[in-house]
Image (cartoon, helix red, strand yellow):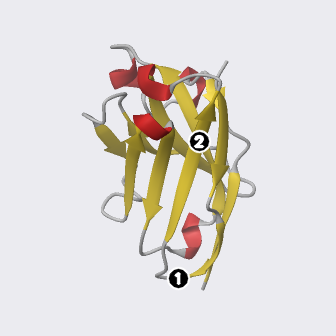
């Protein structure tokens, strides 16, 4: 079992920045690919960003490309999502997720059902 805890959410104005963290316990994240997803009120959960176990590959949704950066520190068992130039449409609950790293992940990194473990989420609200 991997337990994931997100932090760093909050209220920010349009154009501002936040850095989300996702800390893992009980298992090392070294063998897991990690993803960030988000869910806005009344909408389905959507992919935001993903990173392979060794940071060699990163992927982003078109809506956040150039503004968000995913990174990880396996020594600290933590994954980050740096969010810059935030927009009101970024308002959502943000979730981190872990998927046991395998070749399949490169084709499914943006599919939430493929991820094995999830955090409880952290709220990000961007005011206009």
Q: Which label lies toward us, 1 or 2?
A: 2
Q: Which residue appears at 55% of the width and 57% of the height?
A: 20
> Quick check: 23 above or below 18?
above
Name the secondary structure under disc 1: loop
66 to the left or right of 115:
left
**In which quadrant of the rendered image does the C terminus lie?**
bottom right
Q: Percent x, y for residue 11?
A: 67, 75
Q: Which residue position holds label 1?
A: 14
Q: Which residue position holds label 2?
A: 23
**In which quadrant of the rendered image does the N terminus lie?**
top right
Mark positioned earlier in the residue sequence (1 or 2): 1
Q: Which residue appears at 48% of the width and 43% of the height?
A: 79
Name the secondary structure under disc 2: strand
Q: Quadrant of residue 40?
A: bottom right
Number of marks drawn = 2
Q: Percent x, y for residue 5?
A: 67, 43
Q: Quadrant of residue 22?
A: top right
């Amino acid at each position: 079992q991997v337990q994931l805890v997100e932090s760093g959410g909050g209220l920010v104005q349009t154009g501002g920045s936040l850095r989300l963290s996702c800390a893992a316990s009980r298992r090392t994240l070294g063998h897991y690919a990690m993803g960030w997803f988000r869910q806005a009120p009344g909408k389905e959960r959507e992919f935001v960003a993903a990173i392979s176990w060794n940071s060699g590959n990163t992927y982003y949704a078109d809506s956040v490309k150039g503004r968000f950066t995913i990174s990880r520190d396996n020594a600290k068992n933590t994954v980050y999502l740096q969010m810059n130039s935030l927009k009101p449409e970024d308002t959502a609950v943000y979730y981190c997720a872990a998927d046991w790293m395998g070749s399949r992940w490169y084709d499914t990194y943006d599919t939430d059902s493929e991820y094995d473990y999830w955090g409880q989420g952290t709220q990000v609200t961007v005011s206009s």
